[in-house]
Image (tube, grey):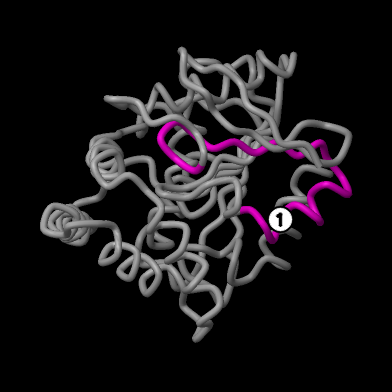
Amino acid sequence: MRFGFFDSDGLKLRYFECGEGEPLILIHGLGESIEGWTFQYDEFSKHFRVIALDLRGFGMSDVPESIAVEDFARDVKNLMDHLGLDKANLLGLSMGGVVCLEFYRKYPEMAKSLILANTLHKLPEEAKPMFEQRLKLLESSPDMSQIAEFIAEMSIHQDRKDLKDMVRTIIRKNNKEFYTMVTAEIGRVNYESLLPQIKVPTLVIVAEYDITTPPALGREIARLIPGSKIVRNSAHLAKLENPEEFNKYVVEFLKN
């Protein structure tokens, strides 16, 4: 296991590596960090060279003054350049899936495959009220405590205090101003025209109790990119609630 830092547009970003073989880059969701993939490292590293990063503004990486989704995609490219990788498999959860789509839009020749987990390609009308609620909560809160509680309750379906505490701890560490900027940025994305153009093998994972990115969103993505699977008995953070099934889907997809 190897931790390190690399330069991305003058920012110092943290990354982590374990295992050997074909590279698999893990791209975390909004407010998460390298630690959010704790239940994936052991299994994935048996089969692949696993690489995870703290995108700019998150985890132990430097916080920029402004942000666009393409900046996150460039972080992934800069990490690949730092490691001397021409191509890699990309796994993104939630916001990380959006980053995967933006990466493919900008650097299609560098993506060997895409795994889009519990994510969105645009914000549908029915999701806008909850999205606005999240922004209002951020604006009215003095720190990240209230949004951390909101995310923990909404993202974990099972009655698992340990997992909810884990999510609260990760979310509370965020810079509130930056987190709010990124939340607003995600609400503006639209990759509907990109999806039919994706030419690499793509797996879409949805979770049946996800209310942040409901299964219908994943099915809409999969309608244009065949190959979706459903991770059961979990909500938005399926990789934490049901890691065995989540990990199995990813490994089987990449092995086949």
Quarter of image, res 53: top right
Q: Name the residue under label 1.
A: 40
Residue span colored magenta: 37-59
**Which is nearer the eye, 174 or 219?**
174
In the figure, 25 relative to 134: above or below?
Answer: above
> Does residue 227 appear to the left or right of 126 in the view shown?
right
In the figure, 207 relative to 46: above or below?
Answer: below
- Image coordinates of residue 76 in percent, x first then y, are 56, 25
Q: Which residue is drawn at 61% across and 21% down?
A: 6
> Does residue 8 appear to the left or right of 57 in the view shown?
right
Q: Which residue is drawn at 45% across and 32% down?
A: 195
Three-letter amino acid code at the position of disc 1:
Gln
Quarter of image, res 203: top right
Q: How many marks?
A: 1
Is residue 182 within the magenta segment? no
In the figure, 225 relative to 205: above or below?
Answer: above
- Image coordinates of residue 202 in percent, x first then y, are 62, 39
- Image coordinates of residue 99 in percent, x first then y, are 46, 33
Quadrant housing the N terminus: top right
SS class, disc 1: loop
Is residue 44 within the magenta segment? yes
**Which is nearer the eye, 120 or 27?**
27
Quadrant housing the C terminus: top right
Q: Which residue is drawn at 42% across and 27% down?
A: 194
**Which is nearer the eye, 188 or 146?**
146
- Image coordinates of residue 225 in percent, x first then y, are 53, 40
**Which is nearer the eye, 62 or 234?**
62
Pointer 1: residues within 10 angstroms few (<14), some, or many (20+)?
Answer: some
Q: Residue at x 35, y 65 (%)?
A: 151
